[in-house]
Amino acid sequence: MDEQLTLVQTHPLSLGGRTVAEYVWRPHLPSLLSPRPYLHPVRTLAGTEVTEAMPPDHLHHLGASLAVPDVGGVNFWGGRTYVRGKGSVPLPNHGVQRHHRWEARTDAVLAQELHWVGPDGAVVLRERRRIAARPVDDRAWALDFRFALHSAAAGPLEFSSPGAKGRSGAGYGGFFWRARRGLRSVRILGPGAEGAAGLHGSRGRWVALSASGPDPWTLVFIDVAAQGDPWFVRGDDYVGVGASLAWSEGFAVAPGEGPRRRIVTVVADGALGPGEAGDLAAAVTAGSTERGHGS
């Protein structure tokens, strides 16, 4: 057997005996992609794939994952690094997120500790992550993604992004979902707005991608904990949504400290309109609040 294949390890997430996602918790990837665990493929209940991994336009886009372009100078996003005054340049500064141990591992819930390691082998961050799949209704299910990052540095550790370094609108970094468009037409929806221009950088409670055409689907990304991070939205060159940690300004954390976040994504069959997407967001938010939202 090919040695590379033996190194890749995955775990399915299932609901009612149906696999709705594969979690690649130990990938085998080149360092240029900032190797990290990711979810791909993610599927609707009808089996339609709604994630894309390693697309030709951005090889470092890995389905649904947690990625940050600059943590203490280390690139945990993949690809080139944006340098103020120089633009995006190739640098040997890519990190890797390594699985450390499982805290829970069932059909519908995965909880793990991860170490974010720099190119010099030093641990930059320690992370506790919890991923859960739960039913919503007969057409949809929800992916609950929570994480808590803790600095392993001896002093202040800075989180940054191209947006924080002067590249307008490029404040990406955090939970990010690269969607599979295919031959479909995709609408971008949000509370009282529509389209990437109106929702990119917005801080509403939810953002949705609604794809019509063959095997239509809808993804509703919900800030259930009211964290207020700006949404990073793309719909032209590619389709993707993320919740940005450092949109236009970087921030520093003390040793042992770091951001904690939770995003719930509803994965639905059918192309939903803004009213239906908003109703789903409200219902899921109410249910998630009842369950609590600590990491």
Image (cartoon, rainbow, N blue to C red):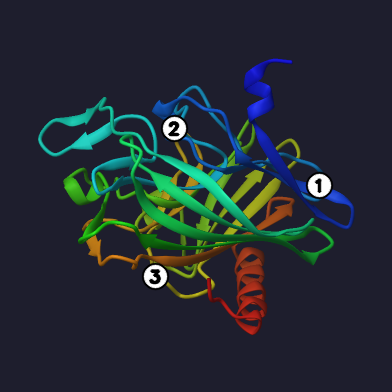
Q: Nearer the viewer, residue 233 or 225?
A: 225
Q: CA distance from mark 3 to mark 1?
A: 32 Å
107 sits to left or right of 178: right
Q: Is residue 184 above or below residue 203?
A: above
Determine the residue located farthest toward the top in the rendered image: 2
Q: Earlier in the sequence, mark 3 or mark 1?
A: 1
Q: What amino acid type is highlighted by mark number 2?
A: Asp
Residue 93 image offset from top left, x and y in percent = 29, 33
Which secondary structure lies at badge 1? strand
SS under mark 2: loop
Question: Residue 43: in sight, yes or no?
Answer: no
Which residue type does callout 1 highlight? Thr
Q: x and y percent of residue 282 in the render? A: 61, 75
Front residue of 274 and 287: 287
Q: Answer few, some or many: residues within 10 Å of disc 3's Cα (few below 14, many 20 plus, some between 14 and 19).
A: some
Residue where numbered disc 1 is placed: 19
Identified by mark 3, the residue type is Gly
- Residue at the far right in the pictured view: 17
- The circle on residue 228 is 3
Residue 164 seen anywhere in this rendered image of the structure:
yes
Residue at horizontal 48%, vertical 70%?
205
- Residue 237's mark? 2
Residue at the spot 34% in from the left edge and 67% down from the top edge: 256
- Residue 64, percent across and down? 56, 46
- Where 284 falls versus 82 (above or below)? below
Disc with the residue nearer the chain's start (3 vs 2): 3
